[in-house]
Amino acid sequence: MTANQTPNQVAAKVLSLLDAVLEREKPEIILVQGDTTTAFAGAFAAFNRKIKIGHIEAVLRSGDALSPFPEELNRRLISQLTTLHFCATGGNKRNLTAEGISEKSIFLCGNTVVDALNSILEKEQPSAKIKKLLDETNGFKRILLTTHRRESFGETMAGNLKTLRDFIEQRTDVCLIFPVHPNPNVKRITEKILANRERIFLLEPLDYVNFCRVNASRVADCVRFGRRSGRSFGFRKTAFILRENTERPEAIESGAAKLVGGNLKKLKFALIGTGGIAQTYAQTFNASDCCRLVAAADVNEDSATAFAEPFDAKVFNDYKTLAENSAIDAAIMSTPPSSHPEIAMYFMRRGVNVLCEKPLCLSVAEAKEMIACADASNVVFTMATKFRYVEDVVKAKPMIDSGVLGDIVQFENAFTARVDMSKR
């Protein structure tokens, strides 16, 4: 590996060095996995020597020859050289037959990545260094970040890293673990934006065992940013994919992954209930550069119209019509608390992330049902209360969790002096 090497340089080196191996070993067939330039060069070298080729993870397709670059075109070219195609899903198989590949050469074998994950987790343990990191971050919600695609270099990657940095600074219960790719285009921007920040851990590249162990340690409601949606599916945890498309549509359809484009600043919100508290959200949407209001619903349609007009958002008089006619990432519940469970769970079951105004609901049983629905739907579910980030509350939480105060049977929140809400 050399600094800033191009795909052409990689292909030339692999072709030259692998050719000598093929000449010496004279294999009857070679197996190539994935869509890297190395995989393509290996297949091309074998083809030039009339050696049969088996392609593992065959026929993944994003539909855009330039995204991911150069992987999408690599795998298309490999398919034209391949003798035996080993597919993970029925959708992959259909893609091949649509491209004119004979069914006799296609084998549906499942996802080898998931097989490898299961094997690693059954047999291998993390290194002492990674175990120490996991111990150090115990109690935090962990985000595991991978980002190194060529199409993300420069402004796009910088924007994504800044958004993550700001998110970690605002959320004292979250930490970021980032094994940094050695490519100078990644290392330089990472050092500039993320170095020496609290709860941000920049690591050297991890071997497969340690990467799997860190990946498995993520909490259910946190996500990983990157391209490895197949691995997240194996862990039954959600991945946010920083691209406009993916070669694994099954991951999106199952809820294992969500596309958020090349820029995180595109999250689309709906607001259910446009009464008094809604004005607080109006101020937030006006000031925010990471989300926008696209729809609002209220039984009082005039109220919804007045609220939505400055945002050029759609207006509805009931939440179900809104859900059926709006493409949204998240919904905010600012209706009376008695209605929260029904409305929130309706959106969750549709794969929409939900934020509820306080109080969450009217009983512990309803709260548990809502949490169970969020887990089953694989969505983010939270409640609006900025007091959770206040310094004294942050300090009190570990005391309560530790049990040093005994069993908490009643909690009362009282203001004993004037509170400057603008700083909370």
Image (cartoon, helix red, strand yellow):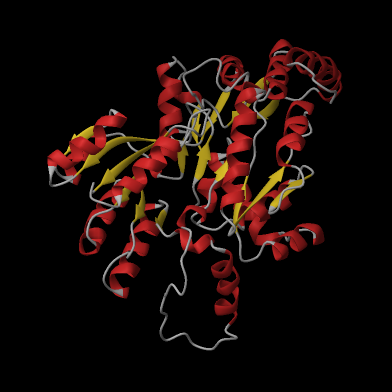
Q: Residue furthest bottom?
A: 406
Locate the N terminus by quadrant.
Answer: top right
Q: Is residue 143 left or right of residue 239?
A: right
Above or below for 314 versus 374: above
List x then y, in percent, for residue 98: 40, 18
Q: Is residue 55 left or right of residue 341?
A: right
Above or below for 260 versus 356: above
Please say whether residue 352 is visible from this viewpoint.
Answer: no
Which residue is nearer to you in this view: 95 or 387? 387
List x then y, in percent, for residue 334: 28, 53
Please say whether residue 312 is visible from this viewpoint.
Answer: yes
For the point 41% across and 31% down, the residue is 91
Which residue is nearer to you in this view: 318 or 413? 413
For the point 50% across and 47% down, the residue is 233
Q: Residue furthest front?
A: 418
For the point 41% across and 57% down, the residue is 382
Instruction: Tell me where residue 394 sits by quadrant.
Output: bottom right
Tally of numbered tags = 0
Which residue is nearer to you in this view: 218 or 316? 316
List x then y, in percent, for residue 83: 58, 21
Which residue is nearer to you in this view: 347 or 215? 347
List x then y, in percent, for residue 70: 63, 18
Above or below for 35 versus 239: above
Q: Is residue 25 left or right of residue 34?
A: right
